[in-house]
Amino acid sequence: MPSGVRLQRIADRIRQEVSEMLVREISDPRLGQVFITDVKVDRELSYADVFVSAVEGHERSKEILAGMESASGFIRRALAGRLDLRIFPRLRFHWDPTPENADHIEMVLADLRDKTKEK
């Protein structure tokens, strides 16, 4: 089994490569303005959980996840050629609400700041 540091390097490389593919190689219109927020690889290198988000938010999440699943075979083949791994993990795509939650928190904090300035 690979060490934790090696797993993190593999996950970072997958995130970087998939992000570049979304910009340069994948022309699916469902995947416009999509970004990869995180990748987690299990210890056996069986699965890589890829977390995605979009500028528009969760309104398009089902459409984006369907597009990512549709492109998963192409992405996995391309990644297997670029990363030197004996066994390449299967990709699983998940919606990441973290950017939306962070934006909501920022708006709440800005509203609180404005209210304290008014007093």
Image (cartoon, rainbow, N blue to C red):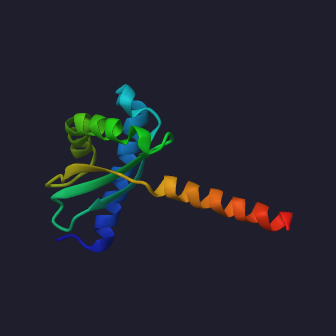
Tell me if 85 is positioned left or right of 33 in this view: left
**Who is closer to the viewer here, 70 or 58?**
58
**Who is closer to the viewer here, 94 or 80?**
94
- Residue 96 location (% of width, % of height): 39, 53
The answer to whether residue 88 is visible is yes
Is residue 31 depicted above or below 9 in this figure?
above
- Count of numbered circles on the image: 0
**Which quadrant of the structure image shows residue 72?**
top left
**Which quadrant of the structure image shows residue 81?**
top left
- Residue 38 location (% of width, % of height): 39, 56
The N terminus - image quarter: bottom left
The answer to whether residue 25 is visible is no
Is residue 79 depicted above or below 48 in this figure?
above
The C terminus - image quarter: bottom right
Is residue 59 depicted above or below 118 in this figure?
above
- Residue 18 location (% of width, % of height): 35, 44
**Which quadrant of the structure image shows residue 46?**
bottom left
Is residue 34 depicted above or below 8 in this figure?
above
Tell me if 102 is positioned left or right of 16 in this view: right
Residue depicted at 43% across the width and 34% down the height: 23
Residue depicted at 24% across the width and 39% down the height: 69
Residue occupying the far front of the picture = 119
